[in-house]
Amino acid sequence: MEGRLIMKKTISALLTLCLLAGLLSTLTGCSGSYPFSKGATVEATVQSGKDTKIGNSAKTGWELMIPDGVMEDGTAVTMKVFSADEAKSYQSSDFTLYGTPIEVSGDGAHGVWFAAPVPVTIKIPKEHLKALAAEELFFATYEDGTWRFFLADNVNLKDGTATFKASHFSLLGFGK
């Protein structure tokens, strides 16, 4: 009987340790600037009759919302969020990236101008929110080796997000 009690206590202690280790792993894996340093690749297929969301600003740093009717049903779209290492080659003296750029590609997605704009949202890394003015921030497309700048439609410093409406997909960045 005493042996069973010791075994139950041992199993209970091991389960508690496993749960705590899992919780710590989850908490540390989602903290800091994860979406902007490791990169990600997100794929979606456009379905007629509904808007298509690609990415999640809280998880991948970027989010696109393709309105119904902008692209044909069945169109495959891939959003590649660059890692911090991949983003280094896109830094320039006149544009400091906040987060990392993305490249959107797929059937009919790259370089195509849309009849209706596509909302794009970025989660601004926390380390860039200090002493920041919304009017200093820009979205940009990378074309022929240079950045072409656009004003954000909305910058919410409290939530740490910025949005704009893209008229076409290409390599997109955000910064100052």
Image (cartoon, rainbow, N blue to C red):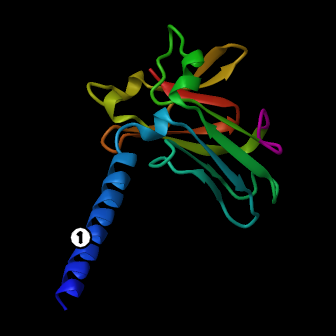
Q: Is mark 1 on a helix, strand or loop?
A: helix
Q: In which quarter of the image is residue 91?
A: top right
Q: Position of residue 5 (x, y in %)?
A: 19, 85
The answer to whether residue 30 of the structure is visible from this angle is: no
Which residue is located at x 31 percent, y 54 percent? 24
Which residue is located at x 48 percent, y 47 percent? 57
Left or right: 57 as drawn, with respect to 73: left
Asked if the magenta segment contains residue 128, the reply would be no
Q: Out of 5 and 100, give the one closest to the viewer.
A: 5
Q: Out of 171 and 69, give the one closest to the viewer.
A: 171
Compared to residue 93, the image places residue 38 above or below, namely: below
The answer to whether residue 27 of the structure is visible from this angle is: yes
Asked if the magenta segment contains residue 111, the reply would be yes
What is the tally of numbered marks visible in this picture?
A: 1
Q: Where is residue 17 in the image (x, y as percent from the top left)?
A: 27, 63
Residue ID for mark 1: 13
Q: Where is residue 18 in the image (x, y as percent from the top left)?
A: 33, 64
User: Furthest residue to the bottom?
Assistant: 1
Q: Is the magenta stretch mostly helix, strand or loop?
A: loop
Left or right: 1 as drawn, with respect to 159: left
Compared to residue 82, the image places residue 69 above or below, namely: below
Left or right: 132 as drawn, with respect to 1: right
- Disc 1 crowd, CA 10 A, few/some/many (<14, 14-19, 20+): few
Badge 1 amino acid:
Ala
Q: Give the range drawn in magenta.
A: 106-112
Left or right: 50 as drawn, with respect to 160: right
Which residue is located at x 21 percent, y 77 percent? 9
Q: Position of residue 61 (x, y in %)?
A: 49, 41
Q: Quadrant of residue 126?
A: top left
